[in-house]
Image: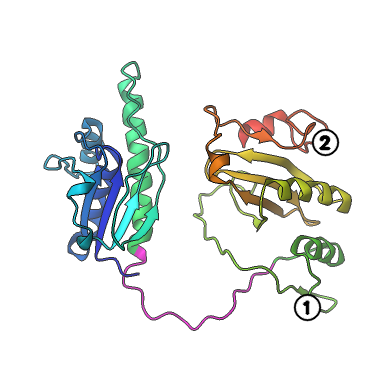
Amino acid sequence: MKTESILFLCVANSARSQMAEGLARHRFGDRVRVQSAGSAPSRVNPFAIEVMAEKGLSLEGHASTSVDAVDPATVDTVITLCAEEVCPAFLGDARRLHWPLSDPDAKDPSLPREEHLRRFREARDRIDGRLALLEALLDLPEPLPAAELHASIRSADLPGAVRFYAWLLGKEPKEWTHRYAIFDALGANFVVLVDDGMTLHHDTLYHLGVGVPDRDAVVAAYHRARELGAPIHKPPRTTWRGTPLHELWLKDPDGNLIEIYARLTPAELADKPADLAPWFLVPGTEPGATEAGESDEEERGA
């Protein structure tokens, strides 16, 4: 990954982008030129200064900068950090990355000081975690001539699993014996996840996923899964926390979790509720309904 200069952008250039600039300067040193700016620059937030100082990093010399003052020729990677707001526009041919993070500045004077600090610490640490991955991608050696990604799972019921995955993937296996079946289907979306020590369950994101075109396709998959007899782990719903998705969770014959999902359109994203409560897409599948496949307690923990 060629990254010689980075520009971090948010609206006020007050908290997220300032912390990102300070963290990146510390992490990358002279290897990468680092800047930050905003579309409505204000001041460096005192809480940002305080939580960065906890890590031995100073923002005292920083000042909020307008994105209009940044020469596009000095930037080859732009990283926007806005979540609820409209991110600043940036002209130029720079590569763009989007790391949406909620603004830690609650702008609520009644909020206790410790809660303000908690929000800023959380934003700081999330930014630093993403920067650690960006650093890992710098100066990669020549890649392998890879032509295929292989993944496999174990099954105690091979015929049942083959039936399930032939339906899920929309095609029969290209070959099989009495011990295995090989499917050649769908483009790979290979995900590497942090080992957080959690038990493998529905909160950990360890699963197989199949993307479908839209919300209606997710609902249709629910009815087809019921026709197949596949266990419904979570009924179709629109979720807003993390990555907003229309999603359906199934289990294969061996209990592995399968997510059927569709990404939201911009119009659907605009309808995001303030409480971020999920929307159930099939009547009668809400928590507590007998066919939902989960209890109220499980839903609250999701």
- Residue 141, x across and y down, in percent: 36, 78
Residue 174 is labelled as: 1
Please identify the residue farthest to the left as the structure is shown. Answer: 61
Relative to residue 157, is residue 152 drawn left or right? left
Give yes or no for contact between labels 2 and 1 (Cβ–Cβ under 8 Å): no
- Of the pair 91 and 94, the residue shown nearer to us: 91
- Residue 188, x across and y down, in percent: 60, 67
- Of the pair 125 and 226, the residue shown nearer to us: 226
Instruction: State how far apart marks 2 and 1 are (Cα).
Output: 35 Å
Please report the residue visible at 55 percent of the width from the left and 41 percent of the height from the top.
Answer: 267
Q: Mark 2 or mark 1: which comes first in sequence?
A: 1
Residue 15 occupies quadrant: top left
Task: Work out which quarter of the rendered image holds the N terminus and state it.
Answer: bottom left
- Residue 168, x across and y down, in percent: 76, 60
Q: Which residue is mark 2?
A: 291
Relative to residue 207, is residue 40 drawn left or right? left
The reply to whether the magenta stretch includes residue 89 is no
Please report the residue visible at 49 percent of the width from the left and 54 percent of the height from the top.
Answer: 194
Residue 291 occupies quadrant: top right
Q: Amino acid at mark 1?
A: Lys
- Residue 206, x across and y down, in percent: 61, 54
Structural crowding at the residue carrying mark 1, measured as other residues with C-alpha within 10 Å and reported as few (<14), some (14–19) or many (≥20) = few
Judge whether 266 appears above or below 159 on screen: above
Task: Work out which quarter of the rendered image holds the C terminus and state it.
Answer: top right
Relative to residue 106, is residue 49 drawn left or right? left
Main SS type for the magenta part? loop
Tally of marks: 2
Residue 113 is labelled as: none
User: Do we see residue 198 in this rendering?
Assistant: yes
